[in-house]
Amino acid sequence: MPVIVHSSYQPPRFFNNSHVQTILPSYIRRSENVDYEREFFATPDDDVLFLDWSRCGRKTDRLLIINHGLCGHSRRHYVLSLVKSFNAIGWDCLAWNYRGTGISAGTKLQFTTNDSTHELDWVTRHAIATGGYRKVAFSGYSMGGNLCLLYLGRHAAELPPEVVGAAVFCAAVDLSASSMMFNTTIGRLYSRHFLQKLLQMIVRKHEQFPEQIDISHIESVTTMDEFDEHFTAPLMGYASARDYWEKASASHWLDKIRVPTLMVNPRNDPFLAGDCFPVKAAEANANLFLEMPDGGGHCGFITPGFDREWWPAFRAKEFLGQLV
């Protein structure tokens, strides 16, 4: 029954508000200095993914594959913190950038969604084949956390044998519940940040495929669920936004996970609700370790001390280190 009752994460005494914990770290967290080597990976569907490699500087058989959040990229602070910490203990790191919603526009109509486990599978098998790694682990935040968990559950029977486990944070594994959170008064403030970038992506895609994307009604799209209804669903082959949420939510696959997996979802995360806190699934699956600290916000985890290791990087290293 691996529900971790007592989390080692404790927010600073005077920063108890969930929105402060979510927003403030973006302004106060130190910037890690990481030099990537970019690889342009040709995908099986004739597109290109930007893979950013950071090698530890010595021969290693260990690799961490990092999945960023919605509209993120490989240079976000939460990615760089993981890279810095794992390089220091002898792991190579690979942070891949999503199509469309990341920094790569892509040459296809498709873009990376919460359901794109096939893309993570491409990246994983390519990394193993080219790097000769014997132990591969995953980490991810928010959308990237859901993508990791969905991959580990949906593909459990055919995972590469090199995959040893994962540690994910603030994973939005119940997309229907999270969409409701975005429709609250506070949630709409957050959704504006994502919508601006997502709609910019749609405009770029329209320039590439003017006959296949109708943007005549784009100004009427003001919520995340409207975006999924008007763009994600029709462009990515779903019957509706609800059909997309149902098929892309990792909550339905948590019972299938067969490698040790740490899932850290703060109880005060303003993006999470419903089955994003899967206590029963963790109690029934010996490989799913659910940790629900009282604080942390959404990918915030304020860690006092400028020189201290960011807590999620410490926790991922602690969990995954014992697996190898």
Image: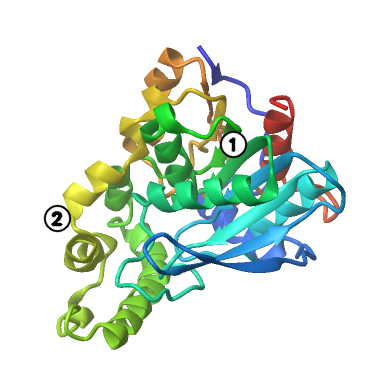
The answer to whether residue 299 shows anywhere in this view is no
Quadrant for the C terminus, please. top right
Q: Which residue is mark 2?
A: 240
Q: Is 149 or 22 nearer to us in this picture?
A: 149
Using residue 154 as the reference point, say whether residue 137 is left or right of it: right
| Residue positioned 36% across, 63% down in the render | 45
| Residue positioned 37% across, 52% down in the render | 116
Vertical order, 155 against 124 (above or below)? above
The answer to whether residue 287 shows anywhere in this view is yes
Q: Is 105 or 193 nearer to us in this picture?
A: 105
Q: Which residue is mark 1?
A: 167
User: What count of labels does the image hold?
Assistant: 2
| Residue positioned 22% across, 68% down in the render | 231
**Gap in angstroms between the C-alphas marked 2 and 1:** 31 Å
Using residue 32 as the reference point, say whether residue 45 is left or right of it: left
Q: Amino acid at mark 1?
A: Ala
Name which quarter of the figure residue 187 lies in: bottom left
Relative image position of residue 15 (x, y in whole percent):
64, 49
Q: Specify few, some or many for label 1: CA neighbours under 10 Å numbering under 14, 14-19, or 20 or more.
A: many
State the SS at label 1: strand
Vertical order, 285 against 39 (above or below)? above
| Residue positioned 25% across, 82% down in the render | 209
Relative image position of residue 28 (x, y in whole percent):
71, 63
Using residue 114 as the reference point, say whether residue 216 is left or right of it: left
Q: Amino acid at mark 2?
A: Ser
Relative image position of residue 75 (x, y in whole percent):
64, 66
